[in-house]
Image (tube, grey):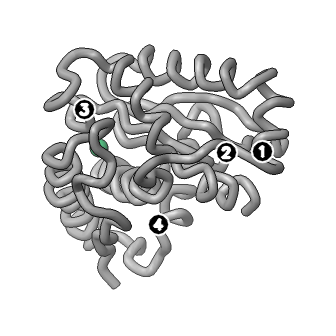
Amino acid sequence: MAFQLPELPYDFKALEPHIDARTMEIHHDKHHQAYVNNLNKAIEATDAGDMDIEDLCRQIGKYPMGVRNNGGGHYNHSLFWSIMQPGGSEPGGVLLDAINSAFGSVGSFKEKFAAAGAGRFGSGWAWLIRNEAGKLEVCSTPNQDNPLMDIAEVKGMPVIGLDVWEHAYYLNYQNRRPDYIKAWWNVVNWDEAAKRFAT
Ligand code: MN
């Protein structure tokens, strides 16, 4: 079974003014679609065709670079669309308690996460993960790697992830990646993040 591009759960323009409609359209319809197409090509000569994308990420070290880059691209973008929503929300419940316990406050967590995103040289992602000890941790990965991957420096279950590739923000923010990261908090879907933390 081939991997499929998931539909966006909202309109292209729904995250404005924080993320503009044109960026969302190109990002979803062109970039994510290309990762899906290239992943389907890259797995043709492998045994990965029937795997789900999370399991594939967990064993990515066994596969060629094309599977790693495009499989990561597919997983990361699918997660990214799902942990955003028009109007955003605030963290609550067990996840809020865990953030306070790990980082001291939501504000300190956001500073640490923003620094991970702004400090990632070149292209990559910033993550809030539940690590193997069950604790929250902030990390970042290069390119389309993610913390589920067996090759990741810091491993865990992604709770939220932020795309800091230029294609995610350049039309609206140009070189101002920190402004994009600051604006992004206004569209985070913390209910979805809480579900991910609980799994
Ligand atoms: Mn992207």
Q: Residues within 10 Å of mark 4 (few under 14, many from 20)?
A: some
Residue on which the image places disc 1: 132
Foreground residue among 90 and 162: 90
* Residue shown at 14% from the left, 50% from the top: 26
Q: Residue flagged by tag 4: what amino acid is it?
A: Ile
Left/right placement of residue 123 relative to residue 134 reads: left
Residue on which the image places disc 3: 169
Residue on which the image places disc 4: 53
Is there CB contact under 8 Å for labels 1 and 4?
no
* Residue shown at 31% from the left, 71% from the top: 7
Circle nearer the N terminus (1, 4): 4
Above/below status of 134 relative to 195: above
Whole-angstrom CA distance, mark 3 to mark 4, is 26 Å
| Picture coordinates of residue 95, whole percent (x, y) | 76, 46
Residue on which the image places disc 2: 156
| Picture coordinates of residue 43, whole percent (x, y) | 30, 68
Whole-angstrom CA distance, mark 3 to mark 2, is 26 Å
For label 1, being within 8 Å of ligand 1 is answered no
